[in-house]
Image: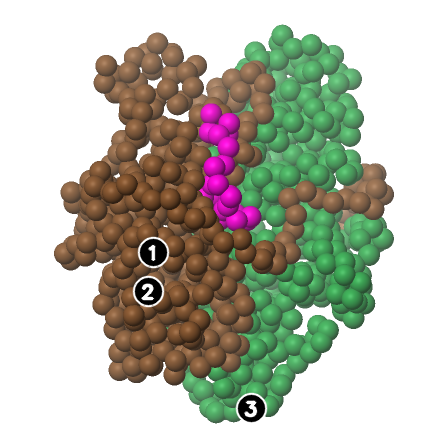
Chain colours: A brown, B green
């Protein structure tokens, strides 16, 4: 029985309402194939610090206090290095499972976070060509559904890159995604939302996802991830993959990269956290790493020269990274435009020599079997592939990699806690009533 | 007992006004708007801090001592005495209590609006300290004042100077962060007619705008760029501090700013995609009144198109949860506050915690997520059962005989616009077999968790 026929039968017999949504995944087979993890570094990560161009003398002129020195850097290929906090990224790079694309980004220089993110998430350039939906959403829509968990955001909301796909789920943190309704409530809500065409799909997705996640929630984390949202999100992604939940794509956001001030202090923990989470994810996945691709991008690189706050302002060309068992890693891709004054974009920023869509297109074509990736990218025509990816099934056997080096825990930013501490607030009672009684409309 | 008579279009308009300008209707607020009328209710709410708050602010000050500390005392309390989380906690608790219980509802809505607009996240001890002062001394007192004053206050607030890094911007290496976001997010908006060059020049104008400890604006002339600048086609002579002040006045009165702020106001109060002619009218009012926020708001709320527009806004998590507490007439206690706080954690909308300078999104596309609706279903299902004793509405419902009477009462409290016929029959069908003692909470859960309660 074909999947479509099964669906039709279930709808006719009323079984769809009663069957847990994950039954739908049966038509997809046990191995849903390739998975894509899209990791967006929000704020504009400084590619010149993440992957410093040690061979370019202009770099040290433009960054007299912020440049990563040759002696501190982790050398990659004789020209580029990695930031000293990127030990875990270096491990992946040396294993041939992480590739860097330098001087990548949007062709149009767009130095507003929100505009540049909107361009990249929609898979377009420039913003005038806005489609309203996302490139990842368009790719996923080609796949015709599958498991209710096939497209997820490990965040409180679905990012623009996945928009347009009605079935993308925002799961927040998987362990918190637990529906606590009695049967009666669940049934009446289903009936009530059946009458609201705008909200019905979301309500049903909550019901389906909460059931489909039960086996995932029973799956423990398989590696030591760094504490914090990024580690949790990648750990959740690994659990979704390893439990066979049918995931095809996950979107993860991680912030803090907008380093206008005291950049060196701010960026060190971010780079350590990124590398350690990624390496833990790789080791956690085991053999599943061979069919997993992580795409790491950011909305722009930062200004080539530093400012007086020991930080950097918004720039243009940045860095992209890809990791996975099917990545031809251990290389820095892209042509380096140089940081000489005449080579800078608008006289101030690293130029872009690789359109960010080039990397996405090659990935969609080679790893995800999309014969016409340009159609997903708004009709844009990519150039020849750069050999960043190997086709599925060609990855060699994966060697064991040591986990992240234990690092001194970076000081946690002080945020509002998840549990409200109401100690000392025991006089709250009856305040509300007193206030409401006190309302005296002025006439 | 028969269904209540259908309510008139005029009454629906009044009830929508309450939904738009408050954190949710209730029997009390329906009564208030009915007695005052549409314009009378707006005029009352526009009085902001002049509205008798029934002792709320005094009680909050007693309860949360950091709220009233001066900058030096608070610095000592937070940094010297190492009470690192106190300023954040007290600000967050006060903010959510005010939103739910303050009679100055429109003021609280505008405080939230400007807190999003001039977003400063409290993600460090330092920013929590500055933000607590800025909320009290700048945003709240000016939330219904003039946009120019608010912009000036924000530009000179240590919270903003610190968050967008202007405090360390010097002639030697100007920091563009504040200049860019001020033009893009606070005033002209994207496409508002400024260039990358304008951003650079604006950054030069604000060099030297910094902070003197513990939390005071200070202009350091020694690090100011005393070259001449050109911003938006106008040459700015090097006069020092007044360069930035005059520039803020100029952009505050700019037509692009009027359009940008008006679009955001219409989006907040009426619909995600504001109608152009509504924005035109509001922007004209903004310009004609010199950016008077009260005048602009009244124009917006009085527009016939706005009055007639149906409820098109998906409640954000805080609006959804506050509306539950208000509709149920829940007595403020630790349990109620904890439930509300959990809604904000699960829904991803803790106060002052959006990490980027653009503030929490104000669109259904963002908030209509599975994560968000999971929270709504769980909270609507759990809260009425937990609040049986602290909810005046549920207590009254429990004293009534008969399902129809209970449904009618809950309808008045939780859905004054009226239950749909289908919804009513579903409520009856599903509650018929429930023991009478369980009915009020179950009915309330279903009404609050249902689709109609997600809109305002």
**Eye-nearest disc, 3 or 2:** 2
**Tags 3 and 2 both on a single chain:** no
User: Tag 1, which chain?
Assistant: A
Q: Quadrant of residue B290?
A: bottom right
- Residue range corresponding to the magenta coloring: A215-235
The percent position of residue B157, horizontal first and vertical second, equals 64, 71
Residue annotated with mark 1: A93
Contact check, label 2 and label 1, Cβ < 8 Å: yes
Contact check, label 3 and label 2, Cβ < 8 Å: no
Separation of marks 3 and 1 at Cα, in angstroms: 54 Å
Q: What secondary structure is marked by label 2?
A: loop
Q: Determine whether B358 is above or below A252 in the image.
A: below
Q: Residue at x 54, y 68 (%)?
A: A265
Q: Residue at x 49, y 25 (%)?
A: A214
The percent position of residue A401, horizontal first and vertical second, equals 39, 47
B78 vs A170, nearest the viewer: B78
Separation of marks 2 and 1 at Cα, in angstroms: 8 Å
* Residue located farthest toward the top when viewing the structure as drawn: B433
A221 vs A315, nearest the viewer: A221
Q: Residue at x 84, y 42 (%)?
A: A426
Separation of marks 3 and 2 at Cα, in angstroms: 51 Å
Q: Quadrant of the N terminus of chain A?
A: top left
Q: Residue at x 73, y 20 (%)?
A: B397
> Mark 2, residues whose alpha carbon is within 10 Å: few (<14), some, or many (≥20)?
some
The percent position of residue B75, horizontal first and vertical second, equals 76, 67
**Eye-nearest disc, 3 or 1:** 1
User: Tag 3, which chain?
Assistant: B
- The numbered mark at residue B239 is 3
Does residue B190 appear in the picture of this structure? no
Residue annotated with mark 2: A76
């Amino acid at each position: 029985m074909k999947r479509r026929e099964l669906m039709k039968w279930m709808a006719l017999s009323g079984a769809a309402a009663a069957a847990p949504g994950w039954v739908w995944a049966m038509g997809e087979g046990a191995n849903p194939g390739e998975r894509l993890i899209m990791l967006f570094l929000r704020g504009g990560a400084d590619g010149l610090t993440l992957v410093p161009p040690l061979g370019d003398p202009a770099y040290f002129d433009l960054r007299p206090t912020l440049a990563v020195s040759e002696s501190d850097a982790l050398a990659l290929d004789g020209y580029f290095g990695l930031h000293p906090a990127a030990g875990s990224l270096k491990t992946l790079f040396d294993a041939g499972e992480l590739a860097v694309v330098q001087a990548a980004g949007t062709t149009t220089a767009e130095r507003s976070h929100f505009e540049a993110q909107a361009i990249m998430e929609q898979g377009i350039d420039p913003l005038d060509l806005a489609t309203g939906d996302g490139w990842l959403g368009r790719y996923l829509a080609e796949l015709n559904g599958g498991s209710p968990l096939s497209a997820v955001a490990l965040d409180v909301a679905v990012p623009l890159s996945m928009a347009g796909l009605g079935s993308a789920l925002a799961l927040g943190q998987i362990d918190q995604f637990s529906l606590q309704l009695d049967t009666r409530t669940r049934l009446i809500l289903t009936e009530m939302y059946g009458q609201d065409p705008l909200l019905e799909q979301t309500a049903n997705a909550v019901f389906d996802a909460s059931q489909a996640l039960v086996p995932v929630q029973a799956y423990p984390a398989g590696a030591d991830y760094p504490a914090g949202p990024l580690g949790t999100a990648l750990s959740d992604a690994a659990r979704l993959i390893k439990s066979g939940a049918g995931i095809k794509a996950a979107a993860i956001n991680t912030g803090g990269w907008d380093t206008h001030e005291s950049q060196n202090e701010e960026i060190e923990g971010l780079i350590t956290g990124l590398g350690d989470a990624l390496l833990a994810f790789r080791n956690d996945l085991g053999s599943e790493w061979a069919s997993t691709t992580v795409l790491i991008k950011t909305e722009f690189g930062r200004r080539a020269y530093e400012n007086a706050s020991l930080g950097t302002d918004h720039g243009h060309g940045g860095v992209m990274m890809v990791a996975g068992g099917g990545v031809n890693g251990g290389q820095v891709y892209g042509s380096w435009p140089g940081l000489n004054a005449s080579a800078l974009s608008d006289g101030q920023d690293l130029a872009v020599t690789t359109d960010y869509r080039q990397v996405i297109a090659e990935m969609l074509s080679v790893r995800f079997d999309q014969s016409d990736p340009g159609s997903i990218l708004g009709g844009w025509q990519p150039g020849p592939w750069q050999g960043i990816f190997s086709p599925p099934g060609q990855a060699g056997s994966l060697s064991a990699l040591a986990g992240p080096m234990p690092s001194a825990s970076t000081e946690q930013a002080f945020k509002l806690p998840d549990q409200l501490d109401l100690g000392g607030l025991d006089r709250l009672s009856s305040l509300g009533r007193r206030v409401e009684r006190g309302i005296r409309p002025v006439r | 007992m028969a269904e209540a008579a259908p309510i008139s279009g005029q009454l629906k308009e009044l009830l929508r006004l309450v939904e738009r300008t408050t954190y949710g209707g209730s029997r009390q607020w329906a009564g208030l708007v009915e007695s005052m009328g549409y314009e009378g209710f707006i005029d009352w709410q526009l009085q902001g801090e002049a509205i008798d708050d029934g002792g709320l602010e005094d009680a909050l000050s007693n309860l949360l001592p950091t709220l009233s500390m001066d900058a030096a005392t608070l610095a000592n309390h937070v940094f010297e005495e190492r009470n690192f989380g106190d300023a954040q906690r007290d600000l967050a608790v006060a903010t959510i209590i005010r939103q739910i219980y303050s009679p100055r509802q429109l003021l609280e809505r505008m405080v939230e609006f400007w807190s999003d607009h001039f977003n400063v996240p409290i993600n460090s001890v330092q920013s929590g300290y500055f933000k607590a002062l800025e909320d009290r001394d700048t945003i709240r007192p000016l939330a219904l004042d003039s946009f120019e004053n608010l912009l000036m206050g924000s530009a000179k607030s240590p919270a903003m100077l610190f968050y967008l890094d202007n405090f360390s911007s010097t002639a030697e290496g100007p920091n563009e962060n504040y200049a860019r976001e001020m033009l893009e997010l606070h005033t002209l908006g994207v496409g508002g007619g400024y260039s990358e060059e304008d951003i650079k020049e604006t950054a030069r104008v604000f060099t030297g705008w910094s902070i003197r400890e513990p939390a005071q604006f200070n202009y350091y002339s020694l690090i100011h760029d005393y070259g001449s600048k050109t911003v938006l086609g106008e040459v700015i002579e090097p006069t020092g501090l007044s360069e930035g002040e005059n520039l803020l006045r100029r952009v505050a009165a700019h037509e692009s700013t009027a359009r940008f702020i008006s679009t955001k106001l219409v989006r907040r109060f009426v619909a995600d995609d504001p109608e152009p002619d509504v924005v035109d009218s509001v922007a004209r009012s903004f310009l004609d009144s010199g950016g008077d926020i009260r005048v602009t708001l009244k124009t917006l709320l009085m527009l016939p198109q706005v009055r007639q527009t149906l409820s098109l806004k998906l409640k954000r998590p805080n609006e959804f949860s506050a509306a539950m507490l208000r509709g149920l007439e829940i007595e403020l206690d630790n349990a109620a506050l904890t439930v509300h706080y959990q809604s904000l954690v699960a829904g991803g909308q803790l106060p002052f915690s959006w990490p980027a300078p653009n503030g929490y999104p104000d669109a259904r596309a963002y908030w209509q997520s599975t994560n968000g609706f999971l929270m709504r279903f769980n909270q609507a299902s759990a809260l009425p059962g937990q609040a049986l004793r602290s909810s005046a509405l549920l207590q009254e419902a429990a004293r009534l005989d008969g399902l129809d009477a209970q449904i009618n009462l809950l309808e008045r409290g939780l859905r004054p616009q009226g239950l749909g016929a289908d919804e009513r029959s579903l409520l009856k069908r599903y509650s018929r077999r429930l023991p009478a003692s369980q009915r009020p909470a179950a009915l309330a859960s279903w009404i609050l968790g249902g689709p109609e309660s997600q809109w305002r």
